[in-house]
Structures are given as C-alpha cells and as structure tokens.
Image (tube, grey):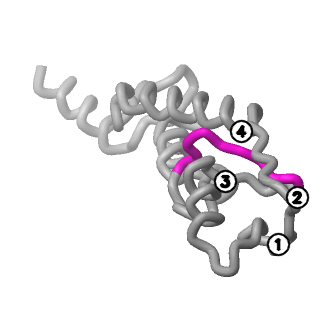
Amino acid sequence: PNAADFLHWNASPAPSALCPICRGHFKDPVILDCDHSYCRACITRYWDESLPRVLSCPQCKTVFERKNLRTNVKLAVEVKITQHLNAKTAEMPLVPKCRRRRGEWIPVTSIQERKVGDLID
C-alpha cells in the first residue's frame, strides 16, 4: 500500500467507527448491556427525548431496567488512535515522490530522448 491508499483509508471512516445516532466520530463512547455503542451525550439525549420514557437500545430495541452506561475503553482508544493518524496523514504530502528503483523499466520515450541527446552532443 502506498501513501495515497493510506490517505484514502483514513479519509473514509469505517461505519463501526461512527455513532449510529449522530453519524459522527464517537465522543466519550459508552457501551450498553446489549453491546451496542454510542456517544454518551447521544444515548442520554435519545433516552431523555423518547416517549414513552423507556430505556431501550435504538438499534436492537432491547429494553433496560436502569441506565447502565459503561465507558467503551477499547473504542475510546481506537478513536484516539484514528484521530492521531488523521492528524499525521494531514502532515504527509498528498503526492509521494516518484523514485525509480534498480531493475524497474524505463519508459521508451526517455530512452529515445537520451539517444537523441547523445547524438547532439
């Protein structure tokens, strides 16, 4: 993979890296008892605005007896790493330098230009 592939991979986040409610990168990710993850603010707002007041998962509709928001540490670390990589790739040049390695082919036009240049000298 080259730098362009790496930039493309980082430019489009995987769906699992996005909160299903706000569709943005997770901010303070929490995990419910059903193993679905949300931003803490998103799931709290969802529960506060839902009528009737039922604590349920927006994805699988599992109903919970009490608020049990556990910080999703693994996801929080992944988000931090992704943010760090995105910051690093923003510093990288968009077009990698083109270098010819030993044994690679040389375009015919450049060989012909060299021969013509040798004849002129």
**Which residue was labeled with disc 2?**
34
Determine the residue positioned at 64% across, 80% down: 51
The tag earlier along the polypeptide, 3 or 4, is 3
Query: Magenta part of the protein: which range?
Result: 25-33
Number of numbered labels in the structure image? 4
The tag earlier along the polypeptide, 2 or 4, is 2
Q: CA distance from mark 2 to mark 1?
A: 8 Å
The amino acid on which the numbered mark 1 sits, given as a three-letter code, is Cys
* Residue 31 or residue 95, whichever sits in front: 31
The amino acid on which the numbered mark 2 sits, given as a three-letter code, is Cys
Residue 27 falls inside the magenta stretch:
yes
Front label number (2 vs 4): 2
Q: Secondary structure at mark 4?
A: helix
Q: CA distance from mark 1 to mark 3?
A: 13 Å
Q: Is residue 115 left or right of residue 64?
A: left
Reply above or below: 36 against 96.
Answer: below
Q: CA distance from mark 2 to mark 3?
A: 12 Å
Q: CA distance from mark 3 to mark 4?
A: 10 Å
Q: Position of residue 74 (x, y in %)?
A: 76, 34
The tag earlier along the polypeptide, 1 or 4, is 1
Q: Marks 4 and 2: in contact by CB < 8 Å? A: no
Q: Marks 1 and 2: in contact by CB < 8 Å? A: yes
**Which residue was labeled with disc 4?**
75
**Which residue was labeled with disc 3?**
38
Q: Secondary structure at mark 2?
A: loop
